[in-house]
Amino acid sequence: MTSNLRLAAVNVRENAHAPYSKFKVGAAIRAASGTFFVGCNVENVAYPEGTCAEAGAIAAMVAAGETQLSEVYVVAGSDMPVTPCGGCRQKLAEFGAGDVVVTMATIGGVEQQTTLAELLPGAFGAAHMKG
Ligand code: THU
């Protein structure tokens, strides 16, 4: 399963639009139905308007009518496995349980696994808005 998710992330990374950072990222999500959704980073000359690979994959999943993710794979061309930024951690937590496995990887084949709960301890959630 994870190897297929890796292939999807590695392939979509090729389409990343990263002329400013030159740092291409690919993300693949396995949704609850088993369907894969992919995204790549899309940068913009107005730098803050750029979007992360994870955000693209999440948007594709939600646009297809799914709101539960079961596994996440993120890959970049760096020496160290790429770790989702703070904003993406919150975005992933919106659609995944704490025990969802997130694999962070390099194109070279280094892989590191963690969970959504480990990535975002003390996550802000709906419970914080009660009362
Ligand atoms: N980036 C992602 O797409 N995902 C991550 O997990 C980390 C960073 C992108 C944003 C930007 O286009 C480039 O990598 C450099 O920060």
Image (tube, rainbow, N blue to C red):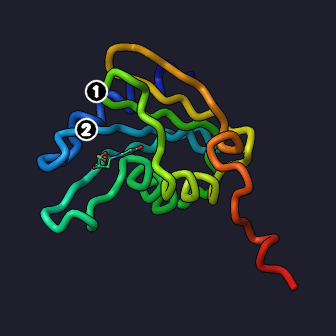
Q: Residue placed at 21% from the left, 63% from the top?
A: 47
How far from the left and from the top, in percent, is residue 69? 61, 46
**Secondary structure of residue under mark 2:** loop
Name the quadrant containing residue 59.
bottom left
Residue pictured at 75% horizontal, 71% vertical = 126
Expressed as whole percent of the image width and height from the top left, the position of residue 89 reads: 55, 51
Q: What's under tag 1, amino acid-wise?
A: Gly
Residue in the image at 44% along x and 25% along y: 105
Residue at left offset 58%, top offset 34%: 102
From the Cβ of disc 2, is ligand 1 less than 8 Å away?
yes
> Seen in the image, is 70 located left or right of residue 53?
right
Label located before the other in sequence (1 or 2): 2
* 75 relative to 97, above or below: above
Tags 1 and 2 touching, CB below 8 Å: yes
Q: Is residue 44 left or right of residue 110?
A: left
In the depicted structure, whether residue 19 falls above or below residue 14: below
Q: Which amino acid lies under the numbered mark 2 shown in the image of this protein?
A: Lys
Number of marks in the image? 2
Of residue 33 and residue 83, the one placed in the foreground of this image is 83
Category of crowding for the residue at label 1, using alpha-carbon neighbours closer than 10 angstroms: few (below 14), some (14–19), many (at least 20): some
Provide residue 93's location: percent of width, then percent of height. Answer: 63, 54
Instruction: Give the image quarter of residue 130.
Output: bottom right
Q: Nearer the viewer, residue 94 or 34?
A: 94
Looking at the picture, tell me which residue is in the foreground, 41 or 12: 41
Residue denoted by label 1? 77
Q: Residues within 10 Å of mark 2 (few under 14, many from 20)?
A: many
82 left or right of 112? left
Pick out the residue farthest to the top: 109
* Residue, disc 2: 24
Return the x and y of residue 81 as percentages of the image width and height.
43, 27
